[in-house]
Image (spheres, coloured by chain):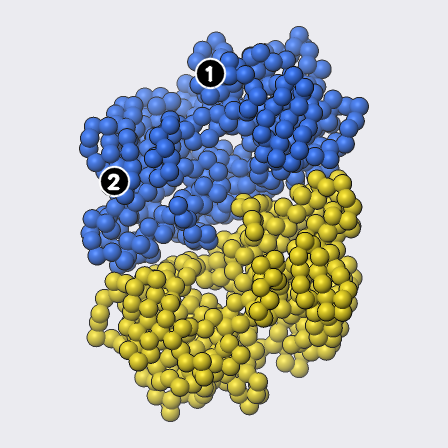
Chain colours: A blue, B yellow
C-alpha cells in the first residue's frame, strides 16, 4: 500500500464519514501516523442526500474531497480502498489494494440499508445511502415520468408516476415532503401532457406515528404537514413484497407505485475477522472510550457502534452529532496517550433532533424546546448549511436553496446516467 | 408515442443541442406542432465540458433540462428517444419508443468522436463529447492518481500520472491548459506523496501548429502559453496505437500515459434511411435554406450539416454560433410559410473564434482583431458565461470560476462513479 514505516504509532481509520472525519481532524498535529481508508475519495453529507435525489441540489455540493481536507497535514495518508478482512492477532488489515499493519484500528464504517433478508425487496427497491444511489433515484424518478407519457393505460400511468417510501424516520419524512413539492410546483409544468395530480406520494410506516424517534408533538405536527402537502401517510402497516409496480402490504391491501424507496432500516457495515460476539444487532458494542468489546486496540465510532449510557440505556441514537462528538472525543483520548484517567468517559451532548417537511415547515425537538413551522425550518436550514464541509459547498447550497425557494423550482432535473436495473 | 394529432403541420426536431434549441425557441408561438426528440433530457453546453472533466465545474451547471426551456409552450412535445430509422417516402420516423409521422424533419444530431476506424484506439482512449464522458474522464484521472500511489515502479507511476491528448483544436488546447493547471496548483497538495512534477501533459497534433482553424498569430500565442504552462506540444505527429499505457506514434517514437484523450476528429450522427448520396464525409450536404440534398421536407442544422457559402467554400465551421444562427434562420423560414422568396439565404455572421489556455490567458480572432492574454481571457469568460442557458447555471458557474481563480483551486475532485473500462 506504500505507506512509509515510521517510529510513530499508526492509527488506521476506516471510513471518512462524520465520525472518521472528526477523529482525523482532531488528530492533526498529534504524534501519530494517520492512515484513512475509504471506498470513496470524498466525504458525503448524508443528511442532504434526499435533496440530491429530488433535484434540489447537485451531488457535488454535498460531497467534499477527503484529500483536500487534509491538505498540508504531516504524516497523513489517504487511500481509496475496500477493506476485506481484519486479522486482530497480527494487527493486520487486508484490503483490495494490499495489506496494512496498524497499532490502532478505528472502525467508522457506518451503516447500509437493511432489507432484513427480503431479497425481492432488495432487488426491486431503491435505497439512498450514497451519492450514487441518490443519483439513481433522481434518474429513475424522471425516467418513470418519461415512460408514463408513452402508455395509454391510466392505471399504468398513475403507477409510473407514483412513489412509495417505506419508513417514516427523518429520511422518509424529508423525502416524502420534497417529492410532494416536486409534484406541486415542478412536475406539472414539465409534464403538461400528464395528469400529475394523479401522482401519489405514499409513506408507509410500521409504527403508529411518523418520526418515531422524536417527541409526540413533533410526530403530530409532521403528520399534519405531510397530509397538507398531499402525502398519503399509512401507519401501522408493513411492506411484504414489491414487483411489477405492485406493493403487497401485510394487511393484504395493495398499493401501486413505479418506485419503492426503502428507508426502513439500516445495518452496520461489519468487518470480517472481528468476533461476532462483539456485535449486537449488526453493530459493535463499544465502551465509553469507544473500544470494541473484546479488543484492546480496535475502536468503533459513529453509527457502527452501540454505546450505552445512563441516559441512553439502549444505545446512543444514530445521528451525525453523536458521530462528530465521538470522533473528537477519541482524538482527545489519543492525544492524552490513551490514558483514560485523564479524560472523562464519552457523554453525548444532545442538541436535539430536527426534520424538515417541505418549504417553510419543519419540526424540532431541542431538549425541552419543541417547536415547528417556519422557525424550525429556518433553524434547520441554518444548522445544515453551517454543518456542510467547505466554503464552496456552503455558498452553492445557499444559492440553490434561495433560488429554489423564490422560484418554486428545483433546477437539477437531469438524467445524466440512466438508471438500469 | 402518444403525441396528439392536430390540424397543424408537425415539425420533428431530432436533437436539443445549440441548433435544435434555437430552432425550437424561434418557433415558439408559431402555427406548427413541435416535437423534439433527444436521447438526453437536457441540453449540454459542450464548450465547457472540458471544465467538468478537470474538476472545475459540476456537470449540473453546464446542463439544462430541456423540458424547463419549453415550460408553458403550447403544442410543444418533448420525448426522450433514440431514433432508429427514417422512412422518407412515408414521412415516418422509427424510434425506440415507437413510430412518428412528420411534415418536416429537422436533423440536428450533431457529431460524435471519430476514431477513423481504429478499433483499438476507440476502446482504449477517452473522448469528451457528452457529460457522462466528461465525468468518466474526471474519474479516470483521479483513479489513476490513486493507483499511482500503489506502485513502487517509477516508470509506472509516471505513466499513470501522465495524460496525452490527441488533437490540438480548441478542445485539445483548452483541456491541456486545464490539466497543466491541475498539475501546478491542485494535485501536488492532494498527493504530497507523489512526485507530481513527473506528470506529463502531452498534446499531439498532426498538423504543424496548434489551433489549426485559427490565425497564425493565435496559434503562435497559444503554443507559447501551453509551453509556459509545461505542456509538451508535439506537432506533425500522429498516434497509431495505444495500449498498456504506451502510445505508438507514426514516427515510431513512443510516449507513455495512463490516459489518452481523443480530440482529433468528429463524424456526423447520420440517420439510417437517408440516402448516402446526401452526405459528404459523414455530414449532410445542405442548401442555404438547410434542406438536405435530395429531400424536400428534411433539413439539417448545426454540426451535422455541411453548408457551403461564398466565404466558406469548404463548408461553414462546426461552431456553436453557426448552429445558433442556423436554428434561428430556419425558424424564420417556417414562420414565413417556407417561402424562400421572403427570406434571404443563410449567411453566417462570423463573430470570431476564441480559445482559453489556463488562467489569464486566451487567444481570440475576432474578424480583423486578433489578440491574446488577459483581455482575451476576460472576453472568453464573459461570452461563455452569457451563452450558458439558465440563470442558475450562469450564477453557479460565475461563482465557481471566481472561487477557483482566487483560491487556485478546482473543488470538484470527486470520483462519484468509478470509471471501469
Q: Quadrant of the C terminus of chain A?
A: top left
Q: Is residue A292 visible?
A: yes
- Answer left or right for A195 relative to A350: left
Q: Position of residue A411 (x, y in %)?
A: 43, 52
Q: Position of residue B279 (x, y in %)?
A: 47, 81
Q: Residue furthest right?
A: A7
Up-down relation of residue A57 to residue A119 (above or below): below
Which element is circle 2 on? strand
Name the subunit of mark 1. A
**Identity of the residue drawn at 72% across and 63% down:** B248
Q: Quadrant of residue A228?
A: top left
Q: Choose between A277 and A302: the one closer to the eye.
A: A277
Judge the density around disc 1: few (<14), some (14-19), many (≥20) Cα neighbours within 10 Å. few
Q: Position of residue A279 (x, y in %)?
A: 50, 16
Which circle marks residue B123 in the picture? none
- Mark 1 in CB contact with mark 2 (< 8 angstroms): no
Q: How many numbered marks does the figure carry?
A: 2
Judge the density around disc 2: few (<14), some (14-19), many (≥20) Cα neighbours within 10 Å. some
Which element is circle 1 on? strand
**Identity of the residue drawn at 54% across and 57% down:** B133
**Identity of the residue drawn at 20% across and 48% down:** A155
Disc on the earlier residue, 1 or 2: 2
- Answer left or right for B189 relative to A267: right
Report how far apart the C-alphas of labels 1 and 2 lie in the structure: 34 Å
Q: Choose between A353 and B222: the one closer to the eye.
A: B222
Q: Position of residue A342 (x, y in %)?
A: 67, 10
Q: Residue furthest bottom?
A: B341
Up-down relation of residue B332 to residue A223 (above or below): below
Up-down relation of residue B358 to residue A405 (above or below): below
Q: Choose between A84 and B133: the one closer to the eye.
A: A84
Q: Which residue is mark 1?
A: A280
Which circle marks residue A246 in the picture? 2
Amino acid at each position: 500500500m506504500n505507506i512509509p514505516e515510521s517510529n510513530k504509532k499508526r492509527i488506521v481509520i476506516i471510513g471518512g464519514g462524520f465520525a472518521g472525519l472528526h477523529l482525523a481532524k482532531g488528530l492533526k498535529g498529534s504524534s501519530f501516523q494517520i492512515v484513512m481508508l475509504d471506498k470513496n475519495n470524498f466525504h458525503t453529507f448524508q443528511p442532504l442526500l434526499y435533496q440530491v435525489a429530488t433535484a434540489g441540489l447537485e451531488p457535488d455540493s454535498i460531497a467534499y474531497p477527503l484529500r483536500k481536507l487534509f491538505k498540508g497535514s504531516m504524516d497523513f495518508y489517504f487511500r481509496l480502498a475496500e477493506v476485506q478482512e481484519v486479522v486482530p492477532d497480527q494487527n493486520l488489515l487486508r484490503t483490495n489494494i494490499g495489506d496494512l499493519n496498524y497499532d490502532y484500528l478505528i472502525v467508522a464504517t457506518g451503516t447500509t440499508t437493511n432489507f432484513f433478508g427480503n431479497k425481492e425487496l432488495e432487488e426491486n427497491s431503491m435505497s439512498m445511502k450514497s451519492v450514487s444511489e441518490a443519483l439513481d433515484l433522481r434518474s429513475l424518478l424522471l425516467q418513470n415520468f418519461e415512460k408514463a407519457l408513452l402508455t395509454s393505460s391510466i392505471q399504468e400511468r398513475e403507477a409510473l408516476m407514483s412513489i412509495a417510501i417505506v419508513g417514516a424516520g427523518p429520511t422518509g419524512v424529508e423525502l416524502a415532503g420534497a417529492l410532494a413539492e416536486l409534484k406541486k410546483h415542478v412536475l406539472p409544468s414539465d409534464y403538461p401532457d400528464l395528469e400529475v395530480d394523479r401522482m401519489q406520494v405514499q409513506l408507509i410506516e410500521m409504527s403508529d406515528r411518523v418520526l418515531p424517534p422524536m417527541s409526540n408533538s413533533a410526530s403530530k405536527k409532521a403528520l399534519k404537514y405531510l397530509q397538507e402537502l398531499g402525502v398519503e401517510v399509512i401507519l401501522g402497516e408493513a411492506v411484504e413484497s414489491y414487483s411489477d409496480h405492485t406493493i403487497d402490504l401485510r394487511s393484504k391491501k395493495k398499493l401501486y407505485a413505479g418506485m419503492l424507496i426503502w428507508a426502513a432500516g439500516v445495518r452496520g457495515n461489519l468487518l470480517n475477522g472481528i468476533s461476532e460476539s462483539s456485535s449486537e444487532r449488526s453493530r459493535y458494542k463499544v465502551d465509553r472510550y469507544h473500544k470494541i468489546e473484546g479488543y484492546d486496540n480496535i475502536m468503533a465510532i459513529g453509527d457502527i457502534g452501540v454505546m450505552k449510557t445512563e441516559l441512553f440505556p439502549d444505545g446512543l441514537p444514530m445521528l451525525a452529532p453523536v458521530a462528530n462528538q465521538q470522533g473528537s472525543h477519541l482524538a482527545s483520548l489519543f492525544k492524552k496517550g490513551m490514558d483514560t484517567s485523564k479524560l472523562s468517559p464519552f457523554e453525548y451532548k444532545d442538541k436535539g433532533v430536527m426534520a424538515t417537511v417541505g418549504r417553510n415547515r419543519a419540526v424540532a425537538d431541542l431538549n425541552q424546546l419543541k417547536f415547528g413551522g417556519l422557525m424550525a425550518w429556518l433553524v434547520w436550514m441554518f444548522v445544515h448549511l453551517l454543518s456542510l464541509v467547505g466554503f464552496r459547498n456552503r455558498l452553492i447550497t445557499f444559492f440553490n436553496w434561495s433560488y429554489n425557494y423564490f422560484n418554486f423550482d428545483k433546477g437539477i432535473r437531469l438524467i445524466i446516467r440512466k438508471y438500469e436495473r
